[in-house]
Image: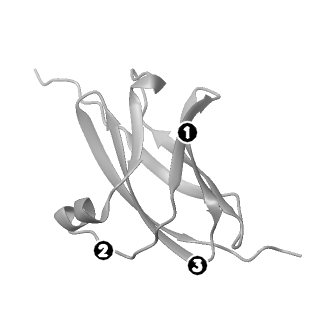
């Protein structure tokens, strides 16, 4: 008999901010059964970690913070920056850690101009 597998993942990123504003985005954490929200850690990979994984490195030095939260029995992570986003495209690689497991997800984020 095989062991049960817990496979968390990061879903699509929904960007709630516009170009010229601080980043405010939300990502659903998928397949979160039997895992406590407090056991989940989200982080951004450093350039050296990205090189080790063979991920493309497109430099941007925005400091990002991550806040996990639950809503309607689903888990999410909010991705925030304090700096204004000035480039129309961001490339971010995130690490999702839980228990003794981890997974990665790459995001190419297109920032739309602010509507008048």
Disc 1 element: strand
Quadrant for the C terminus in the image: bottom right
Label 3, label 2: how far apart the Cα atoms are: 17 Å
Relative to 8, say whether 87 is above or below: below
Q: Residue at image x 69%, y 73%?
A: 19
Label 3, label 1: how far apart the Cα atoms are: 23 Å
Q: Which mark is residue 67?
A: 1
Q: Which mark is residue 87?
A: 3
Q: Residue at image x 71%, y 66%?
A: 21
Dot 3 crowding, Cα within 10 Å, few <14, some 14–19, many 20+: few
Q: Residue at image x 63%, y 63%?
A: 83
Label 2, label 1: how far apart the Cα atoms are: 25 Å
Q: Earlier in the sequence, mark 3 or mark 1?
A: 1
Q: Residue 7: percent from the left, percent from the top?
A: 31, 37
Residue marked by disc 2: 56
Of 94 and 14, nearer the camera is 94
Relative to 90, say whether 38 is above or below: above
Circles 3 and 2 in contact, beta carbons < 8 Å: no
Q: Residue 77: percent from the left, percent from the top?
A: 54, 42
Disc 2 element: loop
Q: Residue 87: percent from the left, percent from the top?
A: 58, 78
């Amino acid at each position: 008999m095989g062991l049960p597998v817990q496979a968390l993942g990061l879903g699509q990123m929904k960007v709630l901010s516009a170009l010229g504003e601080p980043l405010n985005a939300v990502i659903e954490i998928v397949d979160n059964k039997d895992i406590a929200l407090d056991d989940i850690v989200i982080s951004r990979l450093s350039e050296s970690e990205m090189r080790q994984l063979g991920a493309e490195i497109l430099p941007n030095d925005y400091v990002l913070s991550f806040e996990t939260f639950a809503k309607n029995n689903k888990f999410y992570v909010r991705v925030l920056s304090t700096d204004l986003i000035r480039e129309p495209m961001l490339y971010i690689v995130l690490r999702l850690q839980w228990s003794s497991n981890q997974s990665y997800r790459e995001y190419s984020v297109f920032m739309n101009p602010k509507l008048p």
